Amino acid sequence: MSVGQDMYKLCEKMFPYCRSITGDGVRQTVEALKEVQPKIKVYEVPSGEKSFDWTVPKEWRIRDAWIKNSKGEKIVDFKKTNLHVVGYSIPVDKKVSLAELKQYLYTEPNQPDVIPYVTSYYKERFGFCMTQNQYDNLPEDTYHIYIDSELFDGSLTYGELVIPGETEEEIFFSTYFCHPSMANDQLSGLALSAYLSKYVESKDKRRYTYRFIYVPETIGSLTYLSRENHLEHMKKNVIAGWNLSCVGDDRTYSMVSTRYGNTLTDKVTKNVLSFIYPEYKCYSFLKRGSDERQYNAPGVDLPICGFSRSKYGEFPEYHTSKDNLDFISSAGLFGAYNVMVECIEAMEHNHRYKIKCYGEPQLGKRGLYPTISHKGGYDEVTAMMNFITYADGTNDIVDISDIMGVPVRDLVKVAEKLRENGLVE
């Protein structure tokens, strides 16, 4: 559980940073990730660079924002919560009536006590966010609205870590940093990815190469794919991968299938979740919403599933001030970490096995069969014989796990024992 606690502490550290798709809040976040995983490399992509059908936008910088009433009292203050300002707001400094003020205010009427998260990345505007309760109680007055921000030719920031393995075949993990203070739909994926990279790095042997990226959602994944022949390389080498999003709560587990739901990633994710949390929710690609959209797009066609605890858009705290540090937990984060570790290990051990003799092998002469026969004493032998039955060269270990209803981690021990005794290859 200490890994879960470490992940939670990392989320606590990153929570106050004012993130958007560009800017210093993103850079602060990357630096916090680098304290955990120093090998993350940081890249800056200039504003105006083409990313397939998109263009890297101007960088946004915000220093302060507030709304004051006629008494000079701040009724909205960016420095108290960065959700009070619409993301990418252009500067403003003027006095307005209540009627005009309301044109620039955003609330969540169905959840009157939350501040919504609102952005306007690709159309210049400004705005403020507050609770519906506060909005309903605003008195007639003259209000001073102020945003000290700027849009300028800067850059988009992303992070990358590649951990080499014995082969060039790759397993890919992607997550994003572009939201302000939201814990589940932002920080949890970052923390999980950073600590998964440490787990992968600690392995004595790695069959596969592992690629971890940290990008602003949508524009970041598109920018990454469009640069330095990444797409060509990944189409050739990536055999499985996950987009990590909203992995910090403890309500459920969820996955978003690939476009056709028929990849190795789909199979492994379903297998692992079926043993850890059989009530998990599997959403079709029609319910996509995060960067699995880009990785599964026609022409990209990477085998990337979405992985979450409670899926984005499916929990009431989503994109509101209620998605705070109280909503996630070290236990929730550790649960997600455990699922992904199991997926990694399933991938690492996912060979096809074939029995090397005709008929049932004689286990006794190899010391694999009990010398005393009694009722209930054959569980391990039964597992071994069932494994042999389906080790016909057509099934990989995940297939056999699905057939037998036994987790891959247990079958790995069976397979190794049989292999050591020369019974399977």
Image (cartoon, rainbow, N blue to C red):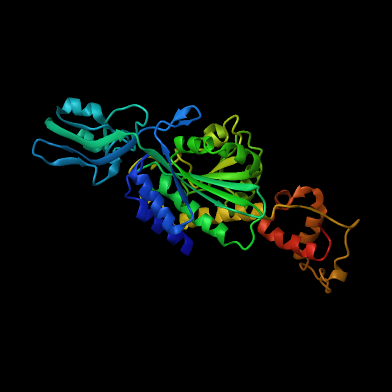
Residue 150 visible at all: yes
**Rendering coords of residue 271 (x, y %):** 64, 49
**Rendering coords of residue 148 (x, y %):** 22, 37
Pick the front one: 133 or 304: 304
Asked which quadrant contains residue 177, the reply is top left
Left or right of residue 184: residue 61: left
Which residue does the image show at 46% across and 35% down from the upper left? 218
- Residue furthest left as drawn: 71
293 relative to 274, above or below:
above
Which residue does the image show at 46% across and 57% down from the upper left? 38
**Rendering coords of residue 21 (x, y %):** 39, 38
Image quarter in which the C terminus is found: bottom right
Residue 139 visible at all: no
Left or right of residue 35: residue 85: left
Label count reads 0
Which residue does the image show at 22% across and 28% down from the upper left? 102
Left or right of residue 151: residue 137: left
356 relative to 75, above or below:
below
Asked which quadrant contains residue 13, the reply is bottom left
Asked which quadrant contains residue 23, the reply is top left
- Residue furthest right as drawn: 358
